[in-house]
């Protein structure tokens, strides 16, 4: 028997769940949030870059007490071969603004702070509580959840599934299928601690300034993947991720790739002498628009990574999670205010609000990119980075070989690796997927 009822139950206390629970509680709804971890953030992994705009919409004055590491003023993009990298480097003093746009954070600390805001807004937050099942009536409407606590059945008008990328509850209840290994990356991450002044000298930073490096190339062994290096106050978050299906196909291991990335000469110098204090592994949804499952139904909505809302092209996830959590809560609040039931028909409002937001517009724009990068991984992540590195090495080396000969040799090496038709085809398909 269900003994207690809420207006809404939120499963999960990550970015999406906290955004949803906070918004619902701020609107005066009776909310229960359930989190299996010891505390909000204890199970969560991120690079982590926080996007201020999406948090400001939830907590306008968050800068006053949120645990922020550094605000980002510099972005580097590296295309790597085994010994070198060719870089695109953007740095701007304009990002030393009064209200910076992007920050690095440490999720365990940040999520704890976020959860405190949720509790202060009036939601009941229960940690160390795993939701084991969605309760459905005879017609399949979700009417609550079962937890691993004694007498663990709780009822609600609507359940917000913010359970993260694997979405086991939704899958078990038949609301969605399991994420495809082609559409999910496995990422591993380490935290490297250094004295603050050493870190700032290595990255040319002062005060709270921060820098980000994102890297593709031979580090992923021809698989669809990317490495990252983010500066925190006294540590560097460093990691790499590739599609799960690529790991299965090649037999490569995430830890093997991470070791290779760390031993690359361009990376080694940045982390030399550091102390590694944390190691984590986590999945990232990377299938984009085409991988988005059904987002709502009778008595339920799904938000954040559980809804596969992740923009892998721009490495954004937490902002899509916060926005989808907030919009789902606003849709629920509107339905509740009209005293309408939480039917599939009414909850379609959430999808409509999401479609009108940057979340779906951005994901739709890049809908063909994940497939292209997967099918052509060998070219984009191995062959072209190697060719670019070789071309750059020849370009800058002064050795008496004439410039005309060098240019011909570069062209010959490109054509030996890929036919002209193949290169034009890749460029055309990439431009089309970017449109
Ligand atoms: C290595 C890495 C680097 C990343 N870097 C960035 C970055 O720099 N910037 C960015 O914006 N995004 C980044 N992302 C993506 C970002 O972390 C996610 O998009 C975001 O965390 C999604 O939030 P969420 O709330 O949907 O899921 P999560 O943060 O995964 O939260 C889900 C929560 O649900 C809980 N839960 C699950 N099942 C149950 C259950 N049955 N009962 C109770 N609780 C449950 C979990 O314990 C967890 O707390 C990165 C991801 C990874 C893995």
Image: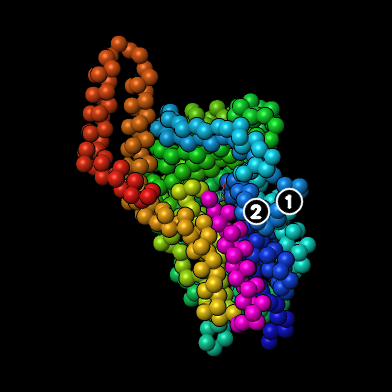
Front in this rendered view, residue 267 or 431: 431
Which residue in the structure is indicated by mark 2?
A: 55
Give me the residue at 57% from left, 86% from top: 137
Q: State whether residue 233 is above or below residue 49.
A: above
Q: Nearer the viewer, residue 119 or 80?
A: 119
Of residues 366 and 183, the one drawn nearer to the viewer in this rendering = 366
Number of callouts: 2
Q: Residue furthest top?
A: 400
By secondary structure, the bulk of the magenta-drawn segment is best described as: helix
* The N terminus - image quarter: bottom right
Query: Residue 288 location, x and y as percent?
Result: 44, 57
- Rounded to the nearest angstrom, the CA distance separating label 1 from label 2 is 9 Å
- Residue 13 visible? The answer is no
Give the mark nearer the N terminus: 1 vs 2.
2
Report if the beta carbon of the residue with label 2 is closer than 8 angstroms to ligand 1.
no
Q: Residue at x 37, y 55 (%)?
A: 368
Instruction: Establish whether ligand 1 lies closer than 8 Å to the Cβ of label 1.
Output: no
Q: Are marks 1 and 2 in contact (CB under 8 Å)?
A: no
Pick whichever, 362 or 372, lies toward us: 362
Asked which secondary structure carries label 2, the reply is: helix
Give residue 294's position: percent from left, percent from top: 47, 70
Q: Residue 221 in the image: x percent, y percent?
A: 39, 41
Give the left or right position of residue 373, taking residue 112 as reference. Answer: left
Q: What kind of colouring is applied to the model shown?
A: rainbow
The residues colored magenta run 316-341
Report whether residue 326 is seen.
Answer: yes
Q: Residue at x 67, y 43 (%)?
A: 99
Q: Which mark is residue 61?
A: 1
Asked which secondary structure carries label 1, the reply is loop
Is 337 a magenta residue?
yes
């Amino acid at each position: 028997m269900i003994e207690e009822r809420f207006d809404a139950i939120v499963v999960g206390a990550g970015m999406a769940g906290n955004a949803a629970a906070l918004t619902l509680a701020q609107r005066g709804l009776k909310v229960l949030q359930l989190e299996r971890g010891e505390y909000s953030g204890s199970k969560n992994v991120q690079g982590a870059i926080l996007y201020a705009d999406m948090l400001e919409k939830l907590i306008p004055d968050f800068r006053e007490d949120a645990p922020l590491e550094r605000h980002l003023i510099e972005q580097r993009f590296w295309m790597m071969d085994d010994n070198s990298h060719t870089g695109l480097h953007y740095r701007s003093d304009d990002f030393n603004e009064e209200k910076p746009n992007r920050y690095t954070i440490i999720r365990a600390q940040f999520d704890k702070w976020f959860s405190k805001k949720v509790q202060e807004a009036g939601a009941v937050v229960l940690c160390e509580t795993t939701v084991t099942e969605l309760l459905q009536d005879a017609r399949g409407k979700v009417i609550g959840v079962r937890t691993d606590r004694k007498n663990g059945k709780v009822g609600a008008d609507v359940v917000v599934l913010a359970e993260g990328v694997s979405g086991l509850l939704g899958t078990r209840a038949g609301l969605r299928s399991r994420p495809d290994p082609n559409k999910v990356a496995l990422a591993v991450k380490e935290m490297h601690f250094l004295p603050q002044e050493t870190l700032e000298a290595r990255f040319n930073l002062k005060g709270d300034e921060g820098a980000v490096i994102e890297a593709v190339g031979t580090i992923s062994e021809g698989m669809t993947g990317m490495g990252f290096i983010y500066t925190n106050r006294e540590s560097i978050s460093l990691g790499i991720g590739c599609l799960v299906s690529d790991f299965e196909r090649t037999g490569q291991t995430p830890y093997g790739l991470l070791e290779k990335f760390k031993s690359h000469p361009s990376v080694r110098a940045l982390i030399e002498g550091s102390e590694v204090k944390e190691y984590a592994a986590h999945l990232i949804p990377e299938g984009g628009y085409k991988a988005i499952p059904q987002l709502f139904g009778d008595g339920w909505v799904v938000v954040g990574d559980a809804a596969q809302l992740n923009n892998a092209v721009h490495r954004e996830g937490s902002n899509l999670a916060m926005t989808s959590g907030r919009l789902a809560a606003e849709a629920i609040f509107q339905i509740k205010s009209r005293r309408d039931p939480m039917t599939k028909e009414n909850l379609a409002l959430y999808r409509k609000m999401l479609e009108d937001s940057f979340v779906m517009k951005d994901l739709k724009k890049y809908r063909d990119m994940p497939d292209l990068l997967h099918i052509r991984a060998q070219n984009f992540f191995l062959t072209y980075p190697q060719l670019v590195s070789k071309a750059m090495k020849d370009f800058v080396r002064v050795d008496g070989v004439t410039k005309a000969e060098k240019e011909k040799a570069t062209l010959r090496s490109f054509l030996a690796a890929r036919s002209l038709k193949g290169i034009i085809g890749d460029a055309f398909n990439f431009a089309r997927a970017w449109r």
